Image (cartoon, rainbow, N blue to C red):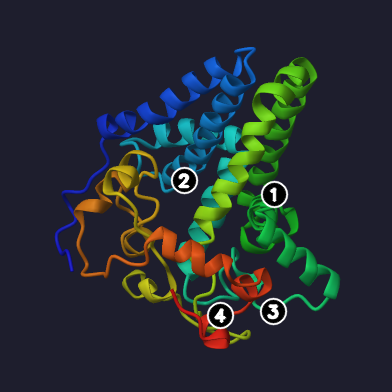
Amino acid sequence: MTKDISQWKARDDKAFLSLLVPTALCVFGVFLSLQPNMFLYSTGQLLLSFFFLQTFILLHECGHLNFFKTRFLNTFFGHVLGLLTVIPFYSWTHMHNLHHKWTGWRDKDPTTEKTVEPQDSPIMRWVVNVSWFLFIPLFFLSYMVSNYWNVMKIKRHLNAQKFRMTILHMVAYVAFYFLLGLFFNAFLIHFVLPAFLLSLIWKELVIMTQHSHIDIPISNGAEVKPVPYVDQVTYTRSFYVNAWFEALFLFNFNHHELHHVYPGIPAYYLQKIDINLPKEPSYIHWFVQAKSMKGEDYVFRTSAKTGKKF
C-alpha cells in the first residue's frame, strides 16, 4: 500500500495537458462533421462521440475539486463540462460525494439504491433485457436522470440550502439549453445530437463496469457507518486496457478501485500508485462476460445470486 500521498497534489499544468486530447477530438470532429461527404461526416460524429465521453469523465474529475489546483478552475470547467454532458455540475458534485461516502451499502448509496430489488413487471424486465442486449443506453440515461435531475431524490439527500442551490443551477441549465435550441436548433440536430446519443452508449459501457453485479451489503434501514475508503475496494471494480489509452483517453477513470481508496488524488496520478491489486479484469473479459448475461441479472442481481464473477 502506498503510504506517502502528499506528493500527489493537483497541478494546473497536468490538468490543462489532459484537455489536449478532448480538444483535438472536438476540433477534428467538428471539422469532419462539416464536410459534405457522408463518410467524413460519420467519422466526425464518431470523434465527437468520444469527445462527449471524455467530457463526462472530466466532469467526474472536476467534481472532486482536485483536478485543477484551485476551486475556481474546477468549478468553472465543471460547469462547462456539465453543460456539455447534460448533468448539472452542482448536483453532480454533491450526489457523487454521497456515492463515495456510502459505497459499500447498496441501499444507502443514492446511485445504487434503486438496483436493490429486481424489476417485478414482466414488461420492465423485457425492456431492461432488450436494452442491454441491443446496446440501448437505458441504464446510463436512468443513472443520469434519476441521480442528478431527480428533484425529489436530491431533496432527500441534501439540506435546504444545497437543495435550493441545486434547483437554481438546474433552472440555469434548462434556460441555457432552451436558448441553444431556440437559436441553433438545426445545427444541434445535425451536428451534435447523433454524436451525443452515440456517446451515451460509450458512457454506459464504462460506468457499468464500476459497481454493477458486485455483492454489496444492504443495510435494510439499520443504523450503519460508512465503509472506510480503503475497504471500498471490495465493492468496486476496475478494468484494464493499454496503459497509454488509459492515461490519454480514459484519464485513468478505469482505475476505479484506486479512485475509491484515494478519492482526493487527481486522476493523472493514479497509474503511479500501487496498492497491490491484480490487474484484472481486462475490458474485453468484462465486456464478454457482462453482455452474455441478461440485463436484469447483471444490474439487479449480484455475484452472490448468479455465481458469476469478473
Front one among 123 and 266? 123
Image mark for residue 58: none
Is there CB contact under 8 Å for labels 1 and 3? no
Q: Circle 3: is it few (<14), some (14-19), or many (20+) Cα within 10 Å?
A: few
Q: Circle 4: is it few (<14), some (14-19), or many (20+) Cα within 10 Å?
A: many
Residue 39, image x, y percentages: 59, 23
Residue that carries the numbered disc 4 in the rendered image? 302
Q: CA distance from mark 1 to mark 2?
A: 16 Å
Q: CA distance from mark 4 to mark 2?
A: 28 Å
Is there CB contact under 8 Å for labels 4 and 1? no
Residue that carries the numbered disc 1 in the rendered image? 149
Q: CA distance from mark 4 to mark 1?
A: 27 Å
Q: Amino acid at mark 4?
A: Thr
Q: Amino acid at mark 1?
A: Trp
Q: How many marks?
A: 4
Residue 159, image x, y percentages: 62, 58
Q: Residue at x 50, y 54 (%)?
A: 206
Residue that carries the numbered disc 3 in the rendered image? 117
Using residue 97 as the reference point, say whether residue 241 is left or right of it: left
Q: Residue at x 60, y 13 (%)?
A: 35
Residue 76, image x, y percentages: 47, 30
Q: CA distance from mark 2 to mark 3?
A: 29 Å
Locate the N terminus by quadrant: bottom left
Is there CB contact under 8 Å for labels 4 and 2? no
Is there CB contact under 8 Å for labels 1 and 2? no
Viewer can see residue 258: yes
Q: Is residue 219 above or below residue 265?
A: below
Query: Which of disc 4 and disc 3 is earlier in sequence?
Result: 3
Is there CB contact under 8 Å for labels 2 and 3? no
Query: Which of disc 2 and disc 1 is earlier in sequence?
Result: 2
